[in-house]
Image (cartoon, rainbow, N blue to C red):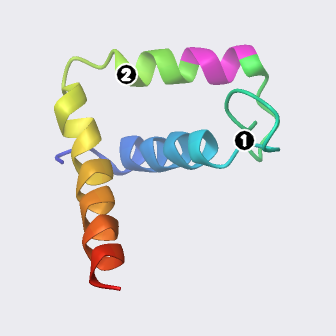
Amino acid sequence: MDLDTRLIKRYQQLVHNHTHPNSKVQAGMKASINTQSSLAQTQALWRFVHNDTISYQELNKPLLENSLQGCREECKR
């Protein structure tokens, strides 16, 4: 993935927040550590996923690769 450092950090933060909810019974993303409002976080996510320089397939590639690796490791057990 050919993204600049700022976009890579944003991507990692968005994925982490999405995969680590505050509680098992709460829906939606976990708020980030900083003091951004939920509106600001929503706008940041929208800008990130609507970035014309990278496709959804490229954004999902690391997630799919990690998922496949996890499946392979679990199947070996």
Element marked by disc 2: helix
**Disc 2 residue type (three-letter):** Val
Above or below: residue 5 compared with residue 31: below
Give the residue at mark 2. 49
Q: Disc 1 on helix, strand or loop?
A: loop
Left or right: 33, with 2 as reference point: right
Bounds of the magenta span? 39-43
Residue 41 inside the magenta-drawn segment:
yes
Q: CA distance from mark 2 to mark 1?
A: 17 Å
Position of the C terminus, as image quadrant, is bottom left
In the displayed structure, does residue 56 sit left or right of residue 25? left
Give left or right: position of 29 versus 19: right
Q: Is residue 40 magenta?
A: yes
Residue at position x 34%, y 68% in the image = 70
Asked if residue 57 is positioned above or below residue 7 in the image, the reply reads: above
Corner quadrant of residue 35: top right
Q: Earlier in the sequence, mark 2 or mark 1?
A: 1
Badge 1 density bin: few <14, some 14–19, many ≥20, Cα 10 Å? some
Neighbour tally class for label 2: few under 14, some 14-19, many 20 plus, Cα within 10 Å: some
Residue 75 image offset from top left, x and y in percent: 29, 75
Where residue 29 sits: x, y (%)?
Answer: 67, 32
Residue 32 circle label: 1
Left or right: 37 with respect to 6? right
Q: Which residue is rendered at x = 19% and y = 26% of the image?
A: 55
Instruction: Count the numbered circles shown.
Output: 2
Q: Residue 46 — which label?
A: none
In the displayed orientation, state which residue is furthest to the bottom: 77
Residue 58 place in picture, x, y as percent: 18, 38
Predominant secondary structure in magenta? helix
Q: Amino acid at mark 1?
A: Ser
Q: Nearer the viewer, residue 47 or 25?
A: 25
Which residue is at 37% across, 22% downward? 49
